[in-house]
Image (spheres, rainbow, N blue to C red):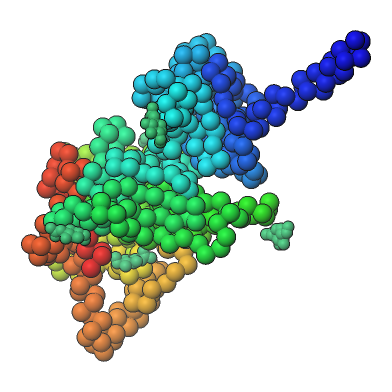
Amino acid sequence: MAFPILHARLLLLFVLPSWPLVFSQANREIHLGSSLVASDNSSPWRSPSGEFAFGFYQLGNQNLFLLAIWFDKIPEKTLAWYANGDNPAPEGSKVELTSDGQLILNDPKGDEIWRPQTTLNGVTHAYMLDAGNFALVNGDQNSTHVWESFKNPADTVLPTQVLEIGGTVSSRQAESNYSKGRFQLRLLPNGNLVLNTFDLQTNTAYDAYYWSNTYDAANRSNSGERVIFDESGRLYVVLQSGENVILKSGSAESTGGYYYRATLDFDGVFRIYTRSKLQNNGSWVQSWHVPKDICSEIRGELGGGSCGFNSYCVYDKNGRPTCECLPGFFPVDPDNKLDGCKHNLTQKCEAGGSNPEDLYQKREVSNLFWPYSANFEKKDSLNEDVCWKSCLYDCNCVVAVHNEGTCWKKKMPLSNGRANWSIHGKTMIKVPKYDASSGMPPLQDPIRGKKKDQGTLILVGSILLGSSVFLNFLLAALISLVRSSSSQKRHKLIRSSSILETNIRSFTYEELKQATDGFREELGRGAFGTVYKGVLSSSSSEI
Ligand SMILES: *[C@@H]1O[C@H](CO)[C@@H](O)[C@H](O)[C@H]1NC(C)=O
Ligand SMILES: *[C@@H]1O[C@H](CO)[C@@H](O)[C@H](O)[C@H]1NC(C)=O
Ligand SMILES: *[C@@H]1O[C@H](CO)[C@@H](O)[C@H](O)[C@H]1NC(C)=O
Ligand SMILES: *[C@@H]1O[C@H](CO)[C@@H](O)[C@H](O)[C@H]1NC(C)=O
Ligand SMILES: *[C@@H]1O[C@H](CO)[C@@H](O)[C@H](O)[C@H]1NC(C)=O
Ligand SMILES: *[C@@H]1O[C@H](CO)[C@@H](O)[C@H](O)[C@H]1NC(C)=O
């Protein structure tokens, strides 16, 4: 009898240590009572393939952590979802799937940091699924997903993830700040998929700057019902009629070999990224994005546009939008360029103050444009110097724009500023003299790289203007030569100056009705008039 017992023991010894491992790799069920602790060496809950992990992601080299899901087989561990972006967890925090089926993130003192917003009933276990979805499951009811990360997106949508009506994706504040940012992607109740800016303080959505056009007021069956991102990286809106409206077609390459993600980046652009699974040295490649030109396409009158107030949008050398302060201005938040700029001009409006000539000096930039221009005065037939003086002595004026003999005076805040070669005219900015030497970038042209035909001459013109009287004469001669020789060009210049002035176009009643109907449901809070106008001018970019 001794032999079989020995045998059984050996067997037991052999089986026992490996049994939990085999079990957990086979189905990855996360049991009630399981927990993870935030520390730099905690091991996450991985999906069966190992491609995704759920756990604590350390922020930079701070001792702060996000409860997150990330691509676990690539070196950068790109985040696909995060729970507590606004409220990072200190080291020692704990996430627990409690014995009564709740998912709770507590700090080391036991105070709650985060939990799912819906009531969780009947959760028997959880899964980290291979698609990148973390699901709380009711095993007694056909494995229903009581809660899942796919239904509660952060800034990223993964293949097989579906955005239902009301679904919202939010940007983060900055590259490495996961607090909620100023941009949203939403599938509106009317079926349109839109991108809009958003006021974090009041929870209000501003005008859309992209929309999928999947809304038909006359026929609901032509309106969107859900948005699907599929395994081949295809993004499309499914209409109520069942038809698909493709926003981005899938890739022809074998789908298994690539990772895809669609992320609303902190700069407000919604991008689809692709990455080879095979090359370990690979990187995320952008394969699609909307809007095509965010600097020009954000036009809403309210909310400060893509860059916040008193700054301007310009593309960097990689073609990414970035935000710059006007000369003499500095960032409201040095860590977040999208938060706008300010200055500390304190000109008194009462008479008898100091002479503004002693307090302020002029800085010049060309090719800047404000579609909602903050103009409060326009004067024809003023030369540049008189235009400048008129602003200098006016306590309400911060910027004067001079173009073709017309002078506009602008007040704060300046919103939706952008740099664009095809915009002419000189921007003159009032800058305190004490700031003159310190903390200001050297005067430079806002646009690096891209040149546009008709803008070039005028740009060269403005540089020369600033540098020498002699060249001034030369330029004047040149400009009048060009003008008289090309009446067509002249027509263009006049048109662009009228754009500078008002940026208002006329629309047919049909256009108006369509555009406003498309957004009334969600974007109208508070100020209908302005919202309509914003949408209209946006839609003008489509014409
Ligand atoms: C479980 O699924 C089956 C088949 O899909 C369905 O007939 C049944 O009603 C479901 N049961 C529950 C409790 O949802
Ligand atoms: C992220 O930005 C917010 C808002 O600007 C700020 O309050 C927060 O401290 C930042 N978080 C980190 C981790 O830097
Ligand atoms: C609505 O659109 C669907 C799909 O295009 C079409 O089949 C249907 O006839 C339309 N209904 C009306 C009332 O126009
Ligand atoms: C990445 O690695 C592959 C083979 O491992 C190599 O062929 C390729 O040149 C590498 N690419 C870069 C950018 O280093
Ligand atoms: C104006 O702002 C700059 C930059 O923050 C600061 O260094 C300077 O002290 C400010 N001046 C006044 C008068 O507030
Ligand atoms: C300049 O503005 C025009 C008209 O708004 C626009 O079509 C063009 O894309 C802009 N160019 C740049 C570089 O922003």
Q: Is residue 228 above or below residue 45?
A: below
How many numbered circles are shown?
A: 0
Residue situated in front as seen by the camera: 334 or 467: 334
Q: Residue furthest bottom?
A: 485
Q: Is residue 89 above or below residue 177?
A: above
Q: Residue furthest left?
A: 509
Which image quarter: residue 522?
top left
**Residue 416: percent from left, percent from top:** 29, 52
Q: Residue furthest front?
A: 1
- Residue drawn at (23%, 77%) of the image: 492
Quadrant field for ligand 5: top left
- Residue drawn at (92%, 14%) of the image: 3
Q: Quadrant of the C terminus?
A: bottom left
- Residue drawn at (44%, 57%) of the image: 234
Residue situated in front as seen by the camera: 370 or 295: 295
Q: Inspect this view and state whether residue 15 appears.
A: yes
